[in-house]
Amino acid sequence: MNTVFRNWCRALMNKRRVLVVAEMLCLIAVASVFLIASPLALAKKNAAGGCDCPPGCACAQAACAQAACAQAACAQVAAQKKKAPVPVQAAAAQKKKVAPAKAATFVSILTNVSKTSPTTLTAQLFNHITLATLKKDSWAWVTVTLNVKGKTETFGAEAFLNSRNRPVVLLAEILPTSSSVANADPRPLAELLKDPNLLALIKSGNQIPLIGIN
Amino acid sequence: MRNSVSLHKIGIAKFTGLLVLAALAVAFFVAPIAMATGGSNKNAVALLNSNVNIFFLGKVAGNRTVGTTLSVANTKLPLSLTPTLPANQVLGGSWFMCAVKDPATVNTFYIFTCTVSGVNGITIAPSDVTNNRVAVILGLPANTAATTPAAMKYVGKKGTLRYTLTRNVLSTPVAIKQALNAAGTGW
């Protein structure tokens, strides 16, 4: 190998110089790419729709939800870029404000849906679901409860397993909460539908871990 | 005495170096990219066959007239159905009722709960509605007992939603309404 290197050095000094210099440049280019752009990070970023995932937002999930997650992340990043530097306490408060919901508690799965009039429906509720059911009946409609500013709120949602086979929901509709539920929000549905906090939770399109299933 | 190496040996050494570089390229570029893309598509929503047509029946939401009473589990949940919906109220993730036409028969429909989605992601742009680029992910059928095993395989799959758009308002195509009536679906 020593002699190979010696010959290589000698070649550097003679007429094959151009070839060797080209080879060196090529090696430097490859090394630069390795150093500057981490291909793994790049691949993950692309898979997440072109931007990084915020904490608590699992981007590598079902394709459609994934894009929503990526969009939410993009919006978050863009918003953060626009904002001027703020004091630490204010920043912490802002962070607290946009933090995604920690977990949604399963209440029931909607099974048979029947039409009772041209504008009304009735859905049969069943209060038991397993991971196996969820795997088979992905994107089933469920009702979940969520703690929003100290009150228990009920939402209609779609349940499915994410890429790590963990149950998650995507909030879809605001529903009234049964008075039998602890700390229930007593407001009528018409009023709940105007609540900006509840609407923001639905519009964010975030996937929320689903708990309370067997 | 001067040690010299033949050009043949230099060629072998260079070729070996090239192989090492190629192996590095695979290890650093191809494998991670395959891992990342493969991982993200693991639970991607499967697409419905293009010969299976899905039609809009209406938007489902909580029933305002019911007020604060929500039935407890194992009973019934009252909901509202909006058969005509302004285009700007089509939101990704919301609940629709959909009629799926059985491609194997002349006039058989299965009613499914479905989730509104964009063609590529869950979000919908206003132009998607006017350009007929609204997709839905099928949930459970409205009546599981009346759904064939073949139709049950549609659960969790995504397809393009078909609807009539008149003055920016979505509704069920007239021909489908008539066919649903003729089939006695009750929808």
Image (cartoon, rainbow, N blue to C red):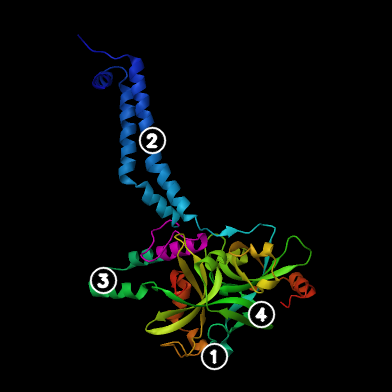
Q: Are marks 1 and 2 on the same chain?
A: yes
Q: Nearer the viewer, residue A102 or A112?
A: A112
Whether residue B117 is situated above or below residue A176 in the rendered picture: above
Q: Secondary structure at mark 4?
A: strand
Q: Chain of mark 4?
A: A
Q: Are marks 4 and 3 on the same chain?
A: yes
Q: Are marks 2 and 3 in contact (CB under 8 Å)?
A: no
The kind of residue tagged 1 is: Gly
Number of other residues with Cα within 10 Å of mark 3, as a class: few under 14, some 14 to 19, many 20 or more = few
The tag earlier along the polypeptide, 1 or 2, is 2
Q: Which residue is mark 3?
A: A86
Whether residue B27 is situated above or below residue B40 in the rendered picture: above
Q: Are marks 2 and 3 on the same chain?
A: no
**In the image, residue A76 lies in the stretch drawn in magenta:** no
Q: Chain of mark 2?
A: B
Q: Secondary structure at mark 2?
A: helix
Residue A157, x across and y down, in percent = 51, 74
Q: Which residue is mark 4?
A: A114
Q: Secondary structure at mark 1?
A: loop
The kind of residue tagged 3 is: Val
State the separation of the CA atoms marked 4 and 2.
Answer: 60 Å
Please state which of the two labelled residues, at mark 4 or mark 1, is closer to the viewer: 4
Q: Residue furthest front?
A: A214
Is residue A66 visible to us here?
yes
Residue B161, x across and y down, in percent = 64, 65
**Can you tell which mark lies on residue B183?**
none
Q: Which residue is mark 2?
A: B23
Is residue A87 visible to us here?
no
Please state which of the two labelled residues, at mark 4 or mark 3, is closer to the viewer: 4
